[in-house]
Image: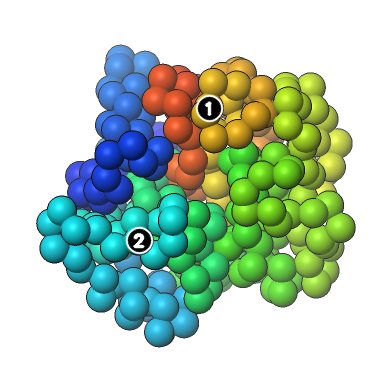
C-alpha cells in the first residue's frame, strides 16, 4: 500500500518577506527533494481547504474569523507578533495547510494509503486555540487529530513532535483531554519556553523530554526510546500524527541541537514500529520547522523514505 504526499502551490503564496526563516523556499526545497526517482511511487494529491467545521474543533470562532479576515494588500504584510507574518496569500495557505492534515487523515483512516506526509506551510504546532504565534496560524496537527476523532471515531490519537521547539499549541489542546496524547523532544531553554518534563496532562497523556543545547543523537534517541515511545505504546493509539520539524539538525540556524539527517530516519522507523502493532500502520505526518534549506530537504527526504518502507 502506498504513501500519500499532500501539498498545494498556495502554500508558496504565504509571503513572509525577505530574510524571514519561514520562507517559501523551504517548501520548494522539500518538494524538489521528493521529485527524485526514489519517490516515484508516492501518490501525489493537492491539499484541499480546511472547512470551518474542521478549524472550529480546535479554535474558537473569533480566532478563525480573525485569521481568515487578515488580507493585507501586496507588499504591506501584517505582523501578528515579531515572528508571525500575514501576507495577501497567507489565509489561503493556512487553509490548505490545515486541510492537508484533514485529507491525510481521511486517506489513512479509510485504508486507501498506509501513511501520508503533508508538505505544507505555514506550520502549526505553536498556534494555540485562541492565539497565532511562532510562525503558526492554525494548529494543523491538532486539527488533524480532532478530525480523526469526529469523522472516523478514533478513540485515542497521539501527536508526536520532534521539532526543536516545543509545540505549545498542540499541548494546549491535548493536555486537558485524556483522548489525546502529546509527546515531544525539544531544546530547552529555547522558544517558546514551554514543555517542562513536569507537565503530564490530565491523564499522564503528555510526555515532554527537554534536551539541553548541544545535545545530539545519543540524547535524542535515548529520550524517545526510553520515555516517549514506551509511554505511547502503553497508551495504545488508534492513529499517530507526527509534527515533523527538522530544525533539530546540527546545521539549523535557529537552535543548538546536533542531530544528523539519519536521526530523522531513525525516529520515523521507531514511530512506525509502534504504529505497526498498535494502530495498523496508520501515521499522518505534517511538516513543521527546519530552516537550513539543505538540511531540511535532506532530512524531510529521509523521513519520507522511512514512511515508504513496508
Q: Is residue 97 left or right of residue 270?
A: left
> At which x and y percent is residue 209?
79, 44
Q: Quadrant of residue 216?
A: top right
Query: In the rendered view, would you say 289 is above or below 104?
Result: above
What residue is shown at x 81% (from left), y 61% (from top)?
Answer: 199
Q: Nearer the viewer, mark 1 or mark 2?
A: 2
Q: As rendered, which of 274 and 121 lies closer to the eye?
A: 121
What residue is shown at x 48% (from left), y 34% (from top)?
Answer: 290
Dots 1 and 2: beta carbons under 8 Å?
A: no
Q: How is the image coloured?
A: rainbow
Kindly identify which residue carries mark 1: 252
> At which x and y percent is residue 89?
20, 57
Task: Point out the tag, 1 or 2, that comes first from the N-terminus.
Answer: 2
Q: Quadrant of the image for the N terminus?
A: top left
> At which x and y percent is residue 246?
53, 33
Kindly identify which residue carries mark 2: 79
The answer to whether residue 160 is seen in the rendering is no
Q: Quadrant of residue 262?
A: top right
> At which x and y percent is residue 151?
46, 71
Query: In terms of secondary structure, where does tag 1 sit?
Result: loop
What residue is shown at x 49% (from left), y 54% (from top)?
Answer: 134
Q: As rendered, which of 244 and 253 lies closer to the eye?
A: 253
Query: In terms of secondary structure, where does tag 2 sit?
Result: strand
Mark-to-mark CA distance, 1 and 2: 24 Å
Q: Quadrant of the image for the C terminus?
A: top right
Amino acid at each position: 500500500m502506498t504513501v500519500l504526499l499532500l501539498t498545494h502551490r498556495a502554500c508558496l503564496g504565504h509571503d513572509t518577506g525577505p530574510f524571514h526563516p519561514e520562507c517559501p523556499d523551504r517548501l520548494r526545497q522539500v518538494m524538489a527533494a521528493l521529485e527524485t526517482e526514489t519517490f516515484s511511487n508516492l501518490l501525489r494529491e493537492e491539499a484541499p481547504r480546511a472547512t470551518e467545521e474542521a478549524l472550529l474543533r480546535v479554535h474558537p470562532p473569533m480566532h478563525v474569523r480573525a485569521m481568515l479576515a487578515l488580507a493585507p494588500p501586496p507588499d504591506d504584510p501584517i505582523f501578528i507578533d515579531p515572528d508571525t507574518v500575514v501576507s495577501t496569500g497567507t489565509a489561503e495557505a493556512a487553509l490548505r495547510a490545515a486541510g492537508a492534515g484533514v485529507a491525510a487523515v481521511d486517506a489513512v483512516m479509510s485504508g486507501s494509503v498506509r501513511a501520508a506526509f503533508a508538505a505544507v506551510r505555514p506550520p502549526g504546532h505553536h498556534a494555540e486555540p485562541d492565539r497565532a504565534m511562532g510562525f503558526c496560524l492554525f494548529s494543523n496537527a491538532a486539527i488533524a487529530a480532532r478530525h480523526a476523532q469526529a469523522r472516523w471515531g478514533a478513540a485515542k490519537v497521539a501527536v508526536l513532535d520532534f521539532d526543536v521547539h516545543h509545540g505549545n499549541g498542540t499541548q494546549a489542546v491535548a493536555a486537558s483531554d485524556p483522548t489525546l496524547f502529546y509527546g515531544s523532544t525539544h531544546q530547552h531553554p529555547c522558544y517558546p519556553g514551554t514543555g517542562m518534563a513536569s507537565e503530564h496532562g490530565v491523564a499522564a497523556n503528555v510526555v515532554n523530554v527537554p534536551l539541553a543545547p548541544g545535545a545530539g543523537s545519543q540524547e535524542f534517541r535515548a529520550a524517545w526510546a526510553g520515555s516517549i515511545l514506551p509511554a505511547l505504546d502503553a497508551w495504545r493509539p488508534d492513529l499517530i500524527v507526527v509534527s515533523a520539524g527538522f530544525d533539530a539538525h546540527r546545521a539549523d540556524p535557529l537552535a543548538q541541537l546536533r542531530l544528523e539527517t539519519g536521526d530523522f530516519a531513525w525516529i520515523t522507523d521507531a514511530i512506525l514500529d509502534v504504529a505497526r502493532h498498535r494502530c495498523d500502520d496508520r501515521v499522518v505526518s505534517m511538516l513543521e520547522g527546519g530552516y537550513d534549506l539543505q538540511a531540511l530537504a535532506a532530512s524531510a527526504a529521509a523521513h519520507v523514505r522511512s514512511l515508504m518502507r513496508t
